[in-house]
Amino acid sequence: MALKANKAVLLILKICISSGLLYLVLSRTGLDRVFLVMRHLSPAAFFFAIALYVFAQFISTVRWKLLLPGEMKMRKLFSLYMIGSFFNTFLPGLVGGDAVKGYYLYQATGKGPLAFASVFMDRYLGLFVMIVISALAFPFGYPYFQGADIVWLLPAAVASFFIASILMFGLRLGNRIPMLSVFYTSFHAYRNQKNTMAHALLLSVVVQFSGFLAVYVLALGLGQHVPFLSLLVFLPLIILFTMLPISISGLGVREGTFVFFFGLIGIKPDAAAAISLSWFLTISAGNLLGLVEYIRYKKEGLQIHVSGHAGE
């Protein structure tokens, strides 16, 4: 009961933070002005961004399959991936999408450590490539930060990520954490699979650029010219902020960071907020496929109990 009560309090707190940040951003940008910009969004740009998102999820599934020995069918893995994405977007305060994917995979394989290690490594590789892309783009995008006091932010984020990776994998500090030690052998087994890792990293590049391109297309569809290079620098920071577990699906945090960072390149606050909300809508629309798959799984008697196994 205490665990459920704590989860409920945390969920309420996240809702309050998201609501407060959204109110703060939209009150300053003007809700009517934001909607006015969004009304001019090209339908072609909107649906193309959705297609890019679903494509990125499919490529992510291909990457995930590389990390799994044995013959897991792509159709099933893609279904699990979309279900996990659906939970991340629509039910983030109840059970994480990664836990959902890991739980379903465990049901299918009976190998808990391998299932959750593959989910962790899949997420880590995506984050690793995103950080590397931003680090490589930073010297060329440095002028975008001129006059801002946060020019140190991206280098600090890159340095923190790699220091944490060295501590976790190089010095094997994660092996001393009871919650992680069970999976540590599986994590380190990937280090000897150089060809697999190389292919997985290349697929991660495709995934990340699909996301960057989706935002670029949405900006164009809203009549805003956003330099693609600026997306390579700003989006990783925005995504890192939205990953902080303080809000519901990053709502409020995402819009605030879009307004701030895009303001550095002359994008008006209402236009920046419109791009952010449009991106969230395309992701939500794409993840409705996960809802369809989840309903199918429920009919097969494999439903996840939100307060049960998957949340444990």
Image (cartoon, rainbow, N blue to C red):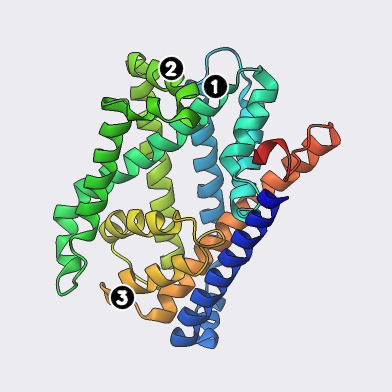
Q: Which structural element holds mark 3?
A: helix
Q: Residue 266, position in %: x, y?
A: 28, 77
Q: Which residue is mark 2?
A: 185
Sequence-earlier tag: 2 or 3: 2
Give the CA separation, mark 3 to mark 1. Answer: 44 Å
Residue 92's label in the rendered image is none
Q: Between residues 74 and 148, which one lies in front from this camera angle?
A: 148
Q: Between residues 167 and 274, which one lies in front from this camera angle?
A: 167
Q: Which residue is mark 3?
A: 263
Q: Report if the CB atoms under discs 2 and 3 are less than 8 Å apart.
A: no
Give the CA separation, mark 2 to mark 3. Answer: 45 Å
Sequence-earlier tag: 2 or 1: 1
Above or below residue 20? Residue 142 is above
Q: In the visual, does 227 lie left or right of 248?
A: left
At label 2, the amino acid type is Thr
Q: Report if the CB atoms under discs 3 and 1 are less than 8 Å apart.
A: no
Above or below residue 125? Residue 280 is below
Q: Which residue is mark 1?
A: 113
Q: Residue 129, position in %: x, y?
A: 33, 39
- Within 10 Å of disc 1 (Cα), the crowding (few <14, some 14-19, many 20+) is some
- Within 10 Å of disc 2 (Cα), the crowding (few <14, some 14-19, many 20+) is some
Residue 62 visible in the snapshot: no
Q: Which structural element holds mark 2?
A: helix
Q: Report if the CB atoms under discs 2 and 1 are less than 8 Å apart.
A: yes
- Residue in view at x 61 percent, y 19 percent: 72
The quadrant in which the C terminus is found is: top right
At label 3, the amino acid type is Gly
At label 1, the amino acid type is Pro
